[in-house]
Amino acid sequence: MTIKILIEEIDQTNKDIYDLLLLGDESKDMLNDYIGRSHKYVAKISEEIVGIIVIIKTRPKTLEIVNIAVKEEFQKKGIGKQLIKYVINRARAEENKIIEIGTGNCGINQIALYQKCGFRIVGVEPDFFKHYYEEFYENGILCKDMIRMKLYL
Ligand code: COA
């Protein structure tokens, strides 16, 4: 059964939202760079914000999902998928043509999720994470390369 969430756009962030954003992007520098020029949509259950998705417009008719995160205790309940579907539907309604997303090579579950939402792998940027982040592992894999994915609407 799909968990019932309310999705709405927000303008402002606070400490709780910023912490959630850091789950989806380890780099504060990158986060601070895009957050002011992004659209942010939160998933709410009752009044609690349980997830967020952030998009920026990169080129004409092209959007990029630059952050997605669901609070740990609410993960694996379909909220991430609902947030992505919401952005896809909105992008389509606004006559965009492409949505892009990038994720680390170690993010096996994220790569699965994005493919289930229709994204295809279109490229790899080897050593993308070498200079940006402290070393980090997920699923026992050192994060090194950026997997670039696209959805043609
Ligand atoms: N283990 C196994 N599969 C997982 C998974 C996990 N931990 N997380 C997501 N998936 C996959 C499954 O294939 C699932 O498919 P199914 O519905 O057919 O079972 C699909 O993703 C949908 O999962 P969903 O419940 O919608 O994902 P979520 O609400 O947990 O949100 C993230 C997914 C990635 C946003 C969430 O796990 C998260 O916030 N992670 C930390 C931040 C992060 O990594 N952000 C992305 C940066 S690129």
Image: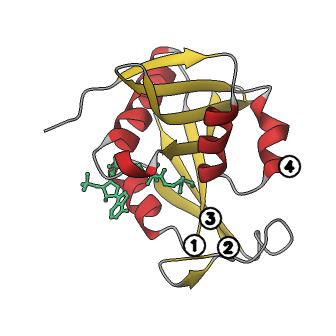
Amino acid type, label 4: Asp
Amino acid type, label 1: Asn
Q: Are marks 4 and 1 in contact (CB under 8 Å)?
A: no
Callout in the foreground (4, 1): 4
Callout in the foreground (4, 2): 4
Kindly identify which residue carries mark 3.
123
- 100 or 36: nearer the eye? 36
Label 3, secondary structure: give it. strand
Percent across and percent down for residue 89 are: 41, 24
Kindly identify which residue carries mark 4.
29
Label 4, secondary structure: give it. helix
- Ligand 1 resides in the quarter of the picture at bottom left
Q: In which quarter of the image is the C terminus?
A: top left
> Label 1: how many residues lie within 10 Å, few (<14), some (14-19) or many (20+)?
many
Residue 116 appearing in the image: yes
Kindly identify which residue carries mark 1.
105
Amino acid type, label 3: Gly
Kindly identify which residue carries mark 2.
145
